[in-house]
Structure formats: C-alpha cells, structure tokens
C-alpha cells in the first residue's frame, strides 16, 4: 500500500509482493478496492498488546500439550 492510504491521492498505488515477483496496481478502482480491504483489516486487527498475549498463551498451550503428549508416549523404565 502506498504510504498515504487515501486512494484518491493522485499517484496512489498498491504494491502486491509475491513469492517470485511483485505487481504494482495503479488504476484508481484497484487502489480503492485494496484501500477498503486494508481499512477493514486494520479495524479487525487486535492491539499489539493483545496480540502479544495471544501468542504467549498459544505458545504455553502448545508447549504444555507437547510435553503432556510426549510424557504419555514415553515407556517407563523397567526397574
């Protein structure tokens, strides 16, 4: 997305980065569509603090789940 998110600004562009190439969209209709999508995504995004807690909690859940799974499949020593 251009630095200025206002699609009515003359020269506004959308840059789509792909795995092996990029695509630059300049048509006002294309810029408007991506601008609306970007605005929607921003409105739906969690705050940085909430995102950090979500990642931390998910990591704890995964780690404890993986440890429990490993413990359940470990064969006890015969002695």
Image: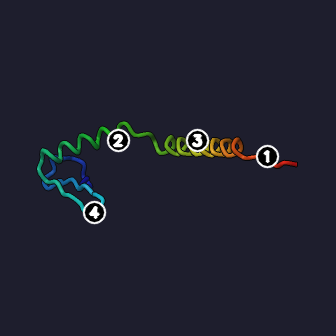
Mark 1 Cα-neighbour bin, 10 Å: few <14, some 14–19, many ≥20? few
Q: Earlier in the sequence, mark 2 or mark 4?
A: 4
- Residue at position x 23%, y 56% in the image: 15
Indicate left or right for 29 with 18 as reference. Answer: left
Q: Which residue is mark 1?
A: 76
- Cα separation between marks 2 and 4: 26 Å
- Cα separation between marks 2 and 3: 23 Å
Q: Is residue 2 above or below residue 63?
A: below
Q: Which residue is mark 3?
A: 57
- Do the numbered discs 1 and 2 sit on residues whose CB atoms are within 8 Å? no
- Cα separation between marks 1 and 4: 50 Å
Q: Give coordinates of residue 50: x percent, y percent.
A: 50, 40
Indicate left or right for 78 with 51 as reference. Answer: right
- Cα separation between marks 3 and 4: 34 Å
Q: Can you tell which of label 3 and label 4 is closer to the viewer? A: 4
Indicate left or right for 31 with 73 as reference. Answer: left
**Res 42 label:** 2
Q: Can you tell which of label 2 and label 4 is closer to the viewer? A: 4
- Residue at position x 26%, y 52% in the image: 1
Q: Give coordinates of residue 42: x percent, y percent.
A: 35, 41
- Residue at position x 67%, y 46% in the image: 70
């Amino acid at each position: 997305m251009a630095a200025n998110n206002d699609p009515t600004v003359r020269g506004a562009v959308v840059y789509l980065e792909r795995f092996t190439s990029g695509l630059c969209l300049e048509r006002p209709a294309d810029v408007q569509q991506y601008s609306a999508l970007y605005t929607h995504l921003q409105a739906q995004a969690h705050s940085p603090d909430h995102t950090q807690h979500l990642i931390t909690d998910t990591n704890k859940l995964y780690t404890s789940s993986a440890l429990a799974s490993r413990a359940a499949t470990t064969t006890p020593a015969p002695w």
